[in-house]
Amino acid sequence: MPADHAAIPSAVADPAADAAAVAPRGAADLIDGTAIAAGVRGQVAGDVAELRERGLVPGLTVVLVGDDPASALYVGAKEKASRAAGMASETVRLPAGTSQAQLLALVEQLNVDERVHGILVQMPLPPQIDPDTVIRHIRPDKDVDGFHPVNVGKLLIGHTDGFVPCTPLGVQRMLAHHGVTVRGADCVIVGRSTIVGKPMAALMLAADATVTACHSRTRDLASHTRRADILIVAAGRARMITADMVKPGAVVIDVGMNRVAHAGAKSGTRLAGDVDFDAVRAVASLITPVPGGVGPMTIAMLLTNTVRAARRISGQTGIA
Ligand code: GUN
């Protein structure tokens, strides 16, 4: 660990800055996703209360097909958070044997239901159902996941009236919360998934970063990551980003959620990110922990997207 690598408080290194005065030498400041998400949720609850006074109750319906335990947990958390914000929240639970036609019929029903402003079909779906077909059937203006090709296209061409997927939106919110300079920054994204990597790249490009998208076929990954002012990792490989792959003073965002063996835990496992947290924290200026980093932001941004959907569908865009 290079002990003389002082943390730098901005994504773009300022050689004149007395960095050590901002973050203790050898330990990046934490980006507390739990706290930032709580702030967003509070804001959403206030917006919902205001909309309710005007007779509009934002409605979110989540559809869960099958009984994948991780999905059931996520869906339960989404329902709880949307209820806590004052929304009309419903979860439709369908058996694992549900046919694609049955699911599409439900989506059509939700598309025309005036009480439903946001529709989210939890992924993954059982093998007999094609996820792309389902996503294409959701009304784009109710697609609070931001997965519909219309919303994906809008993000890419810079139209701001679409929906952006919740995890990249949450990352952007975290960077803004900490005043990280994105314009002109070298932003390296590791992972090219449809849910995180690709929309993240589009968002950062739209915010004037110089974006490098790395993936499993990238040659000499470290040569790219070491150039990053902002390093965003969403590759799904536990602790793959080591300290020697990170530029001193970089802002490091870890989207990874991996179960790894941990002898001390009751379950025998613990959650680990894609970043070797303890070692990288000594090099970076700002870093997200796992858990308690990006994870809580995803649900908070789902609530934000749902309020936006309710306003737009009801025509109350003037109070957005
Ligand atoms: N499964 C894991 N993450 C997500 C998400 O953000 N949206 C949906 N629909 N399914 C998921």
Image (cartoon, rainbow, N blue to C red):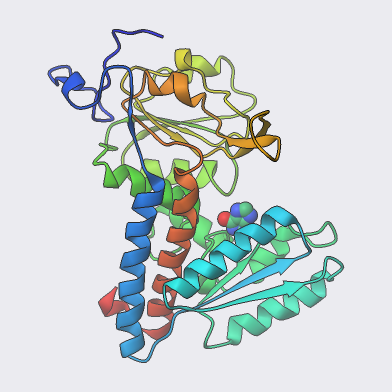
The answer to whether residue 166 is left or right of residue 173 is right
The answer to whether residue 137 is left or right of residue 183 is right
Residue at figure coordinates x 73%, y 56% from the top left: 69
Q: Is residue 76 visible?
A: yes
**Which residue is outermost to the bottom?**
55
User: Ligand 1 is in which quadrant of the figure?
Assistant: bottom right
The answer to whether residue 69 is left or right of residue 191 is right
Residue 94 pos. (x, y %): 77, 72
Residue at figure coordinates x 80%, y 62% from the top left: 129
Q: Nearer the viewer, residue 264 or 272?
A: 264
Q: From the viewer's perspective, is residue 242 above or below residue 79?
A: above
Q: Quadrant of residue 188?
A: top left
Q: Quadrant of residue 208?
A: top left
Residue 36 pos. (x, y %): 34, 51
Residue at figure coordinates x 59%, y 17% from the top left: 219
Q: Quadrant of the N terminus?
A: top left
The answer to whether residue 308 is left or right of residue 77 is left
Residue at figure coordinates x 25%, y 36% from the top left: 181
